[in-house]
Amino acid sequence: MEATAAFEALPAERKGQIAGNLLGEAESEIPPELAAAVAQYLLIHPLAADDVTPDDVETSICELASDWGNRDPLAASRWVATLPEGSARVWAAKNLAARWAEYEPAAARLWVSTLPVGDRFEVVDYLDSGAAWKE
């Protein structure tokens, strides 16, 4: 949490530089809260890091949602809810729900029911296509 607070306190020009460096690192080696702050910053400020593409950011967000969902799906779900509307949020929700449904399908289903309607339909279609709702 200290690292996340330190990142959040950086001036914008340093934040983009640090975020670009951290996104390229193995995110499993940094706390998920910091990885989330970095990815979300770059999603909202796509030109903040020269060598990071929007696809890199979206991939990182999707992987983080899934990985964090393994360790703490409630924290991951709170973070996914803060992402701006768009494909990164939908794919993060799909990945989190699919991972969560592997070991707690009822909890995953309950969380999916709280998603905004458009996101919810996309997540349910995704999960239904892979039979992730098995109990």
Image: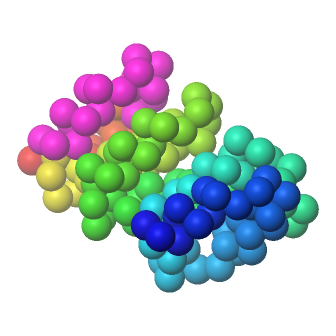
What colour scheme does the image use?
Answer: rainbow
One can see residue 68 in this view: yes
Residue at 43 percent of width and 67 percent of height: 1
Residue at 67 percent of width and 68 percent of height: 23
Would you identify the image quadrant in which residue 8 lies? Answer: bottom right
Tell whether position 40 is magenta.
no
In terms of secondary structure, what is the magenta stretch mainly?
A: helix
Would you identify the image quadrant in which residue 125 lies? Answer: top left
132 up-or-down from 84: above or below: below
Magenta segment: 106-123
Tell whether position 114 is magenta.
yes
Q: State the image coordinates of residue 16 (x, y, percent, origin top left).
A: 79, 60
Residue at 17 percent of width and 58 percent of height: 103
Residue at 26 percent of width and 26 percent of height: 113
Q: State the image coordinates of residue 79 (x, y, percent, origin top left).
A: 43, 46
Q: State the image coordinates of residue 57 (x, y, percent, origin top left).
A: 68, 55
In the image, taking residue 13 as reference, residue 118 lies left or right, namely: left
Nearest the viewer among 2 and 118 is 2
Residue reaching furthest top? 117
